[in-house]
Image (spheres, rainbow, N blue to C red):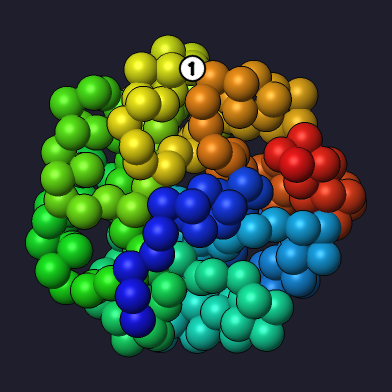
Amino acid sequence: MARISPEQMRSLLKVYFIAGSTNCLQEPRLVLEEAIRGGISLFQYREKGSNCLEGMEKLVLGKELQRICNDNGIPFIVNDDIEMALELDADGVHIGQEDEDASEVRDKIGDKILGVSVHSHTEAEKAKLAGADYFGVGTIFPTATKKDTRAVQGTALLEQLKDFGIPMVGIGGINVDNAAVVMNAGADGVSVITAISHADDVKEAAARLRDIMY
């Protein structure tokens, strides 16, 4: 499989849904199916937090969510767990600054999609050299979903990195009320968790974000 082009990556980042069992108020499979119907363009399986699944249970849910993505033509990304991503033959992985070195991950996954969270110009430079296909830039707005996030920094870094040539998705506290601000700052898309997974109507929430992006 050839490396994804920047143009393809930018298209996929438009509405990037991230979720695992701990984020969903309803059954995760149903949430993902409804989010896809609403128009998400990319999905990341992120199984973290208190009471998260581990071992075989984590793998089984990953397989089921991957099947839903495959059936609907949505690329399936795994957060952090490189071994599981390879076992599932996922479409890619997303790593943070506290995870394995990006260049080592690139060596392991070959041409699969590699996303890297960046919080500074220096981290972005390093990720670009390591072969990142996209940056996750944040934390942009306050969020209660991730307990280990860096300081909130608004859209300043997005604006600094928009001439870098690497596709970018905004991360942190993004919803329908502020998504346009993120896009106007230079992001190619927005990544969301609870804006979709905690919505009363998951399909409608995804569709509203899609309408803003397009």
Q: Quadrant of the N terminus?
A: bottom left
Quadrant in which the C terminus is drawn: top right
Q: How many marks?
A: 1
Q: Is residue 107 above or below residue 180?
A: below
Q: Quadrant of residue 125?
A: top left
Q: Quadrant of residue 177?
A: top right
Task: Characterize the local packing of mark 1: few (<14), some (14-19) or many (20 or more) Cα atoms within 10 angstroms.
Answer: many
Image coordinates for residue 67, horizontal then vertical, percent? 60, 85
Q: Position of residue 151 (x, y in %)?
A: 37, 18
Q: Nearer the viewer, residue 209 or 82?
A: 209
Q: Is residue 49 or residue 39 the one in the foreground?
A: 39
Residue with the mark numbered 1: 155
- In the rendered image, residue 53, in percent from the top left (x then y), is placed at 46, 70
Give the x, y percent position of residue 56.
40, 85
Q: Nearer the viewer, residue 169 or 11?
A: 11
Q: Which residue type carries mark 1?
A: Thr
Relative to 67, 195 lies left or right: right
Q: Nearer the viewer, residue 19 or 133?
A: 133
Residue 97 is left or right of residue 43, and the answer is: left
Q: Residue at x 41, y 32 (%)?
A: 137
The residue depicted at 19 percent of the width and 63 percent of the height is 106
Residue 160 visible to the viewer: yes
- SS at mark 1 in the image: loop
Q: Residue at x 16, y 73 (%)?
A: 108
The answer to which image quadrant residue 192 occupies is: top right
